[in-house]
Amino acid sequence: MHVTIAHAEAAIEAARKKAVELKTQMCIAVVDSGANLKAFYRMDDAWVGSIDISIKKAKTALFFGMPTGAIGQLSQPGGSLFGIEHSNDGLITFPGGLPIVDEEGVLVGAIGVSGSAVENDNAVAQAGVAVLGVSELPEHPWRT
Amino acid sequence: MHVTIAHAEAAIEAARKKAVELKTQMCIAVVDSGANLKAFYRMDDAWVGSIDISIKKAKTALFFGMPTGAIGQLSQPGGSLFGIEHSNDGLITFPGGLPIVDEEGVLVGAIGVSGSAVENDNAVAQAGVAVLGVSELPEHPWRT
Amino acid sequence: MHVTIAHAEAAIEAARKKAVELKTQMCIAVVDSGANLKAFYRMDDAWVGSIDISIKKAKTALFFGMPTGAIGQLSQPGGSLFGIEHSNDGLITFPGGLPIVDEEGVLVGAIGVSGSAVENDNAVAQAGVAVLGVSELPEHPWRT
Amino acid sequence: MHVTIAHAEAAIEAARKKAVELKTQMCIAVVDSGANLKAFYRMDDAWVGSIDISIKKAKTALFFGMPTGAIGQLSQPGGSLFGIEHSNDGLITFPGGLPIVDEEGVLVGAIGVSGSAVENDNAVAQAGVAVLGVSELPEHPWRT
């Protein structure tokens, strides 16, 4: 199941409002359940380097059905997933990427946000997810 | 000078309307004057392969300040730019990418469209450009 | 909608039987509706170079919802899609890749075959598709 | 010497059964002694990001004739192989990839598994190897 463009646009609009509220300039990306880009929005004066980071955060969250920050906690030196960032043409594993799970528990896409401190990035991503569903997947096996 | 997000959104909305009018499903990308992605919109059921093509068309048009199709006429076998597609991580040189030039003759960005026959792609791109300016640059040296 | 592994395995088994019947050694790849690899099978003594070609054929067919050979007819020098192979990390646009469309007209995945003359590649791909559905999409808008 | 497709399929089937027993959804990849993909199987609802990881684990185990986790112990900060993941288009050096060594001590291929905690990934990989041989190579010089 793929997120629709109407849903992706609604998530971006909610994320954008949160970014304005936080007085930040963000890049916001939404991917579908195949990790393919659905919509992207770069606020004026957002970091150019955040374009790729926001897209990679969205893909990373979709790839593993979990917040990017959760992966980052496991990929530190000595951690069980150390070096996972080398896969899939490059992952971003700090906060700001969240799965989008619909009301039936299906992973329909993910959102990635970059442009400020990671706490802000994550808050903006959460604002985007909140209009569509949740970020927590049911116990595996979940569905795509 | 870079296209603003407000302008990019206006171009995408005009392009989207044209795509609906043509009964097509398009991917629409806008890049700024640095060839960096500003906004992206994938209509539901558009070809997945068009995501990358629309972005590459926008970048190609920006890279050289001319319609992608104009480059393609020079990149045919025996042509003066044969093989140019191998540069810049891959160009797309058939129609559907257009520069966005503002009223002062400044190249502020470019739009790329993919999802149907190239004539339709180009018509949708032109609809997007029309709300912001033109596609023709003044004689070189033009400004960015 | 994604092809299931049971369906992917059935397609590969039918393709494999056809390959044996033709006395060929093939690589057979199946991707889901997000163009992500679902299953892959390399017969003994198949060309090593066919691994990547079969996967790229499957992705190409999925990307555009049409047989790879149909794209190749448009991507010749002078054709409307000349140079499209430079997109999406490399396309393969000669025969051997086919969409998999289920009984409801939904593009659920694609199959790619490489290892012999392209006529044989295509025949093996068709044998794989035949157990799951068809390769022809309904008129656009079709669904993914 | 290369693993045969019959052997690769047997390893995948044994690995799949172990994955079901563990109530996990895995991606399972087998490469030959040239580190080229021989067979791949993605269980329904396995992480999309595990496709690439499972293949990279198999390649990594084959590249060096040792379990991926053994390399990861040496590639930590300060370790003798720090940063080795940057080679070979990206390695994965946490557990889940194992060499396949036949009864004559020849490295015939490798298996890579991804989709759960690394302990589960490794257990599933071991189940796959067990039907074909062992994971321990004789003292160097061993044969391929």
Image (cartoon, coloured by chain):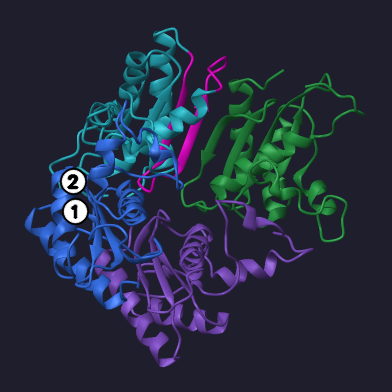
Chain colours: A cyan, B green, C purple, D blue
Q: Position of residue A83 (x, y in %)?
A: 33, 35
**Left or right: C131, with D69 as reference point:** right
Magenta stretch, residue numbers: A25-48
For marks 1 and 2 on the same chain, the one whose residue lies earlier in the sequence = 1
Are circles 1 and 2 on residues that touch, CB within 8 Å? yes
Foreground residue, B134 or B17? B134
* Structural crowding at the residue carrying mark 1, measured as other residues with C-alpha within 10 Å and reported as few (<14), some (14–19) or many (≥20): many
Query: Where is mark 2, residue-wise?
Result: D116
At a point 20% along the width and 33% down the height, the residue shown is: A136
The label number, if any, that marks residue A132 in the structure image: none
Q: Is residue A33 magenta?
A: yes
Q: In which quarter of the view is residue B11 placed?
A: top right
* Structural crowding at the residue carrying mark 2, measured as other residues with C-alpha within 10 Å and reported as few (<14), some (14–19) or many (≥20): many
Q: Is residue A107 magenta?
A: no
Identify the subunit bearing mark 2: D
At label 2, the amino acid type is Ser
